[in-house]
Amino acid sequence: MTSEIAPGPDGLDLPDGQLVRSRVESDPAVPLAAALDRSLTGYAVFEPQDALLLDDEGAGVVTFEDGVPRSATHTGTGAGGPDALADLAAPGPYDVELRELRGDALAALDDPGRRVSPGLVADRLAGDPGLAERTRAAAPDAWTDDAESGGESGSLDAVEAFLDDEQKVEAIRDRAREEAKERAAEWGLDGELE
Amino acid sequence: MVEAFAVASGKGGTGKTTTTVALGMALADEYDVTIVDADTGMANLLFHTGLADADVTLHDLLVADERDDIAVEDAVYERHGMSVVPCGTGLAAFEAADPERLRAVVAALAEDTDVLLLDSPAALGSKSAVLPVVLADRVVVVLQPTIPALSDGLKVQEYAHSYGTDTAGVLFNKVHDPDEAAGVAEKTERYFDGPTLATVPDADAARAARREGRPLLAHAPDSPAASAYREAAANLDVRAGESGDVADRFRSAVVPDAP
């Protein structure tokens, strides 16, 4: 998967690094917690399985330093930072890869314009305040201070932007309706569908 | 007169059980209320209502043939002004449970109450998880102002509508800054059929209540969160149906018991 996104349309050129985890995840909190627990230095690639359906081709790349998210990029839209997370939001599941990099390889990728505050990915992408808190606690204070001085903390702008994207919301609803019908048949509940 | 509501979210950690108990207690001022822990795989209503030692639970009613001596009323406990049907926490009991039997339990409970609140599982991936939404007349969708919670909430609504279960409203829960979240709540209304019943602030009181095994409305009735839940209950337009109709509807779907 990495070779498909490197170099990406936004010029991302990711070294392969070492693959340490590759799974389909319905809850983005799981790989984020895995990265935190193993103090991953490297990056994660999140590819929504509904990407084509949602007309949002591309993947999200989150870099980590010692398990804490440092930056986010959406390879389809080219957005960076908090906006990348809004572009990536989908009901899931995601194909997720965690890759480990040497610290100097990660430093070469650093772009202050794509930074995210330590807890933001857990908050925005996973909706998991507990994990966000745990991640903030693991981060150097300076990282949190950086984000707050940038005015990012506590903002619900990305959530409002998501709700303003009627096409995306409709795609989520359409997919859910189809899924409900498919599963009703599997469970013998199709006689109760409207 | 009975109306059955599924309290659902599609995502864990949104505070569905706290919401179910709080709405139940607030509605109990006006109605006969029964709350049911329909989250049979991850039951925790018993911990919220001081019923951790309950002898008979919903699990016992869902296990076919094992305990024929048990009647539905044996799993009903009068607590905090309402009837509470807790579920056990044993994995073995969950695995032995037949989700289809929930229909018969709900039908029996519907005969004797005004408002039935089904605390529903935080998932849509199995028959037992979806059944409460199928059985309910309407769904109360519990949201948080985050993208994952909103997209999962949208998914719950579409599942519900697919089964003819309407949306009674949405409730924003565990909100850090209700003023800041007002814009999100307003934009959310475009996509959900019901109104925003309330925005409940994140509260230490709710966590403290949970630790003590008491409902929030009993532990901290004057807290802002408790007030918001009462407001949600007041905004919920309970529709007085004919009890016979509803009971018949459930009955018609009941799988006959083995002789």
Image: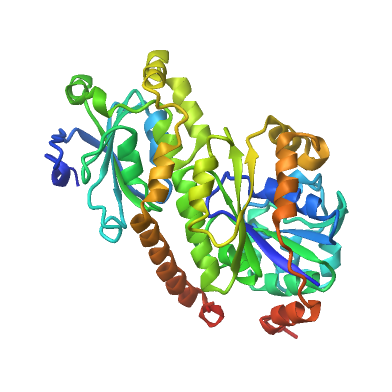
Residue B200, visible in the rendered structure: yes
- Residue at 79%, 46% (x, y): give it: B49
- Residue at 75%, 70% (x, y): give it: B105
Left or right of residue A16, residue B160 in this image: right
Residue A193, how many percent across, how many down? 53, 78
Along the line of sight, which residue is nearer the eye, B185 or A109?
B185
Left or right of residue B221, residue A35 in this image: left
Left or right of residue A108, residue B40 in this image: right
- Residue at 36%, 52% (x, y): give it: A165
| Res B95 quadrant in image | bottom right
Residue B144, how many percent across, how many down? 54, 44
Residue B257, visible in the rendered structure: no
| Res A126 quadrant in image | top left
The way the protein has been coloured in the rendering is rainbow
Residue B92, how many percent across, how many down? 64, 58
Residue B183, how many percent across, how many down? 50, 42
Along the line of sight, which residue is nearer the eye, B195 or B28?
B195
| Res A45 quadrant in image | top left
